[in-house]
Image: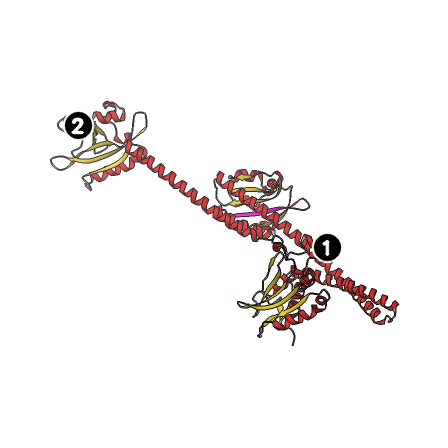
């Protein structure tokens, strides 16, 4: 076999090209011994020639590249390839790596047997450094792009959360929105919303991702419990545990310490008061960076504000329910005495003699009856307002002819209009237009509008009831020649209990509120057009066909 470890077997001494080459060159035996190195290679590696010759070439290669170099040499020895170039690292005297491109070719003897390997070594350190710098820049760019995309996705998710929280009315609905959307935004596996409750307790509203058994066990816990949610609420501090060991040491009784690996608990604050905690849990070990923490704190803040709104809403609903119940009881208790007073007053009017003394009795009885009727009307208005506010108004729907409705309302109010010297008339539609509505409620709405007009129209003025078509709806209007309404007062005209400053003390401020409630229960709309000194026109629409908004529970046909 033509193989040797000595220069003698190389034949003639390498010529000047080898020694003067501007690139590193070396002869390596087939069993991997460095036979000869030129000055350029010695200079590149910072080694003397006697340190290189006779040394295993593998000693000069970086450990991570040694195996690939051996495979490279093997395919050369086996004749698979004649020459090839490979990028690898050599080791300088100080141990630092040097990137080179090594072109290896196999030298053969006269018989064709392999003799040794010639290595031509080009330094590519600058190229590799620039390539590494470019890769780092690209990696930094990719990371920055990912951060931007993540921030945009989180911001979009936050906008969705804000929108959905605006519609959440109860604490449980708030918790559901925050946990469903928020956990997805931070790629968490589980979480919970815990609220501080009465009696020094903490109540967990929802805990998606947690085993049902542990969720039920820790649904209500004392504020003094050795659990992360209790610590967070007591101290108002953000808690982050990225180590199972640290978490177990702090909370050995926490159910999640057996299956989770990363925990974040964020205080939910309203002002300086901590009202609860938002828990975020991961099954794997995660690094929670500052962006993650800031986003989670924003989620907790949004949750806290929405929970406070829900709490106030529930308190307001309870107060309203209590008020309406008290009102209903009072109305029921007062209705019978008022009816009795009106009955007695009517009897006194009929029984009073025709003489002067009887006249005085009748006048007083009429005042008594009018006062009782006014009180009864106030009770009816209060009850109607309560029904409207609770959205429980029941409509007896049936066909009603528009012109007949207008004539009936005008007839009801004609005596008062005549007494106040106001011209009350109608402008009929002139052709049949049957509306589907609750006849009694529509007459009540029109009567409230006419009553308002009679109250504010001066003597000698006029009030006109009219009707017309407005698309697929009928439009009913009450126009007067009164003083008009200030534009700044118009948006509040239909608010409950609201009255303009100039007429404070006149009525309860429920008439227009009831009109709006009746109209909207039919699926219609109400509007007003007024100019100071030129009068006011109130209008409302009613559907010709039954409205989809008049749902089955609020609308029924009258019994035949």
Decide which of 319, 55 is in the foreground and name it.
Answer: 319
Q: Earlier in the sequence, mark 1 or mark 2?
A: 2
Residue at the outermost bottom position? 560
Task: Please rate how many residues cluster around mark 1, counting C-alpha atoms within 10 Å: few if below 14, some from 14 to 19, many from 20.
Answer: few
The quarter of the image holding the C terminus is bottom right
Task: Please rate how many residues cluster around mark 2, counting C-alpha atoms within 10 Å: few if below 14, some from 14 to 19, many from 20.
Answer: some
The quarter of the image holding the N terminus is top left
Which portion, as a residue range, is magenta? 189-204
Distance from Cα at disc 1 to Cα at disc 2 = 116 Å
Q: Is residue 555 magenta?
A: no
Would residue 491 be found to the left or right of residue 17 on screen? right
Decide which of 286, 552 is in the foreground and name it.
Answer: 552
Q: Position of residue 25 (x, y in %)?
A: 20, 29
Q: Nearer the viewer, mark 1 or mark 2?
A: 1
The colour scheme applied to this rendered structure is: secondary structure
Up-down relation of residue 421 to residue 240 (above or below): below
């Amino acid at each position: 076999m033509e193989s040797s470890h000595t220069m003698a077997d190389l034949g003639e001494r390498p010529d000047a090209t080898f020694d003067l080459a501007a690139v590193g060159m070396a002869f390596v035996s087939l069993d991997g011994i460095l036979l000869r190195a030129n000055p350029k290679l010695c200079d590149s590696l910072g080694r003397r020639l006697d340190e290189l010759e006779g040394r295993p070439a593998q000693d000069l290669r970086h450990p991570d590249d040694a195996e690939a170099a051996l495979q490279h040499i093997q395919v050369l020895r086996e004749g698979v390839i004649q020459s090839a170039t490979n990028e690898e690292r050599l080791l300088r005297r100080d141990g630092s790596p040097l990137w080179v491109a090594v072109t290896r070719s196999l030298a053969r003897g006269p018989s064709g047997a392999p003799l040794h390997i010639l290595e031509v070594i080009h330094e590519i350190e600058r190229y590799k450094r620039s390539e590494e710098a470019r890769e780092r820049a690209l990696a930094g760019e990719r990371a920055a792009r990912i951060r931007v995309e993540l921030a945009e996705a989180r911001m979009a998710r936050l906008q969705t959360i804000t929108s959905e929280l605006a519609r959440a009315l109860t604490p449980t609905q708030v918790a559901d929105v925050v946990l469903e959307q928020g956990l997805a935004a931070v790629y968490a596996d589980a979480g919970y919303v815990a609220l501080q409750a009465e009696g020094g307790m903490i109540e967990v509203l929802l805990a998606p991702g947690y085993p049902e058994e542990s969720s039920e066990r820790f649904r209500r816990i004392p504020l003094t419990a050795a659990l992360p949610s209790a610590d967070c609420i007591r101290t108002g501090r953000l808690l982050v545990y990225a180590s199972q060991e640290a978490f177990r040491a702090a909370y050995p009784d926490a159910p999640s310490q057996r299956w989770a690996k990363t925990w974040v608990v964020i205080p939910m604050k309203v002002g300086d008061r901590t009202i609860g905690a938002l828990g975020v849990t991961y099954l794997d070990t995660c690094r929670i960076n500052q962006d993650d923490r800031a986003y989670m704190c924003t989620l907790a803040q949004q949750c806290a504000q929405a929970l406070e709104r829900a709490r106030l809403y529930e308190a307001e609903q309870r107060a309203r329910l209590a008020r309406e119940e008290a009102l209903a009881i009072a109305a029921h208790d007062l209705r019978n005495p008022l009816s009795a007073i009106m009955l007695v007053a009517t009897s006194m009017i009929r029984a009073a003699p025709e003489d002067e003394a009887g006249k005085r009795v009748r006048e007083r009885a009429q005042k008594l009856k009018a006062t009782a009727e006014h009180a009864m009307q106030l009770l009816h208005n209060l009850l109607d307002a309560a029904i409207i506010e609770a959205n429980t108004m029941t409509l007896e729907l049936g066909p009603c002819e528009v012109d007949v409705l207008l004539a009936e309302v005008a007839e009801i109010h004609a005596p008062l209009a005549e007494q106040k010297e106001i011209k009350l008339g109608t402008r009929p539609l002139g052709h049949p237009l049957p509306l589907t509505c609750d006849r009694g409620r529509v007459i009540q709405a029109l009567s409230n509008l006419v009553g308002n007009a009679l109250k504010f129209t001066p003597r000698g003025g006029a009030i006109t009831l009219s009707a017309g078509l407005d698309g697929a709806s009928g439009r009913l209007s009450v126009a007067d020649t009164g003083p008009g309404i200030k534009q700044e007062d118009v948006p509040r005209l239909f608010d409950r209990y609201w009255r303009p400053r100039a007429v404070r003390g006149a009525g309860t401020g429920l008439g227009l509120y009831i009109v709006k409630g009746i109209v909207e229960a039919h699926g219609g709309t109400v509007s007003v057009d007024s100019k100071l000194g030129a009068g006011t026109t109130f209008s409302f629409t009613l559907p010709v066909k039954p409205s989809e908004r008049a749902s089955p529970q609020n609308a029924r046909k009258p019994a035949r």
